[in-house]
Amino acid sequence: MTHPIIHDLENRYTSKKYDPSKKVSQEDLAVLLEALRLSASSINSQPWKFIVIESDAAKQRMHDSFANMHQFNQPHIKACSHVILFANKLSYTRDDYDVVLSKAVADKRITEEQKEAAFASFKFVELNCDENGEHKAWTKPQAYLALGNALHTLARLNIDSTTMEGIDPELLSEIFADELKGYECHVALAIGYHHPSEDYNASLPKSRKAFEDVITIL
Amino acid sequence: MTHPIIHDLENRYTSKKYDPSKKVSQEDLAVLLEALRLSASSINSQPWKFIVIESDAAKQRMHDSFANMHQFNQPHIKACSHVILFANKLSYTRDDYDVVLSKAVADKRITEEQKEAAFASFKFVELNCDENGEHKAWTKPQAYLALGNALHTLARLNIDSTTMEGIDPELLSEIFADELKGYECHVALAIGYHHPSEDYNASLPKSRKAFEDVITIL
């Protein structure tokens, strides 16, 4: 199938080694971060934080987060251009949704008078409350929706990436205690440009299950 | 910010009413479904099924799934062009991953001899096993990653959509028992073209939290 969308999605892949000499431009980074900010989410809850690891000091902290596990991902941290932590809120409160609805008033999407009625959507949060009074089973998928949007955006920008579930959520919560307060992080995304000769995945063919194994048309 | 990616993401929105006279072309549907098939997932597990509701008979079944709740979404079913159920596997087994790795052999991504070593990635499945021996807390986010990819794809194709968590997973599992066996469905996506005058959301400004509320650069 020849189509620009399919071309982009066939050409993106999970980079296994980065060229440390190449950085994502501030212009492209700005497009990626705005795309993340524009991501859709249930009831426009936006129950997430995207923490961009850019400075050497922040990269050292991220590097150190592999002390106990998943060391196979550690080399990406200093070699890639940036790492983005996809964090999802542990407990989503009315105050959290008030921030969303107040911004909707400021953006002239609803009036101040309509705000109370707009809280009706908050019932989705209540429907997705676990036995500990938390909502992470609901907020975590929203963060992955943003991740799907980010991967498509990166494909269009011809920026390489590595999605990493091989991270240490507990140690990350300690090392980035201030930034992750009230959040958890189960997936991080390294971005940059692959090593010209040592990224073994760059030349391997992409593989996906057959159409009929994943898609049913009724 | 003027950029084709940002233009696409600023212009997509959640449609609240469809024009029943307009259908998504088979060509565009094929691009969307191939984009879904190409979605990334942890260890390329592809722990999902995308069930496309196209025929009147299938739409009647989907229409009936709102008998007990979320009737506000019911009108979309017969008015939109298609509905796609995003289903995620309840329990992900070695046999499931064997399908992935056998396809990787067929696609010449790995050799038959490398297959056993490739099973090492299956440890991620074992790390994400719940107390009931299921993996839905791990497979559900992967389905939302595909959903994020689908929303970006639809934005590029100028096809309207409505992401619906307002569905009835239990009744869907009964009504689509054969199709959803071993899976659960927590989110469905209506696609089509918005009603020219009665989609109140079409003209409302988009609203998202401020940059500094969701993005931290370290």
Image (cartoon, coloured by chain):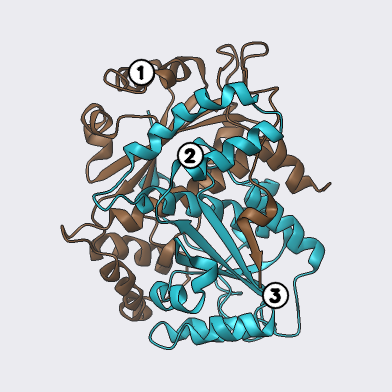
Chain colours: A cyan, B brown
Q: Is residue A160 left or right of residue B49?
A: right
The disc numbered 3 marks a residue on which chain?
A
Q: Could you tell me residue A98's position as x and y percent? A: 54, 39
Q: Residue A62, image x and y in percent?
A: 55, 80
Same subunit, labels 1 and 2: the answer reads no
Image side of residue A49 versus residue A136, left or right: right
Q: CA distance from mark 1 to mark 3?
A: 47 Å
Answer with the quarter of the image where residue B164 lies: top left
Task: Write the residue at 82% across / 48% down.
Answer: B1
N-terminal of the two: label 3 or label 2?
A: 2
User: Which residue type does callout 1 highlight?
Assistant: His
Q: Are marks 3 and 2 on the same chain?
A: yes
Question: Is B70 placed above or below B179 here?
Answer: above
Residue for point 59% across, 61% down: A50
Say what secondary structure mark 2 lies in.
helix
Chain of residue at mark 1: B
Q: Amino acid at mark 2?
A: Ser
Say which of marks 3 and 2 sits in front.
Answer: 2
Residue at which label 2 appears: A42
- Identity of the residue drawn at 66% across and 77% down: A194
Residue at the spot of label 1: B63
Vertical side of B181 occupied by B73: above or below? above
Badge 3 amino acid: Tyr
SS type, badge 1:
helix
- Determine crowd level at label 3: few under 14, some 14-19, many 20+ residues with C-alpha closer than 10 A: many
Q: Badge 2 local density, few (<14 within 10 Å), some, or many (20+)?
A: many
* Residues packed near mark 1 inside 10 Å, few (<14), some (14 to 19) or many (20 plus): some
**Subunit bearing disc 2:** A
Q: Give the residue pinned by disc 3.
A: A193
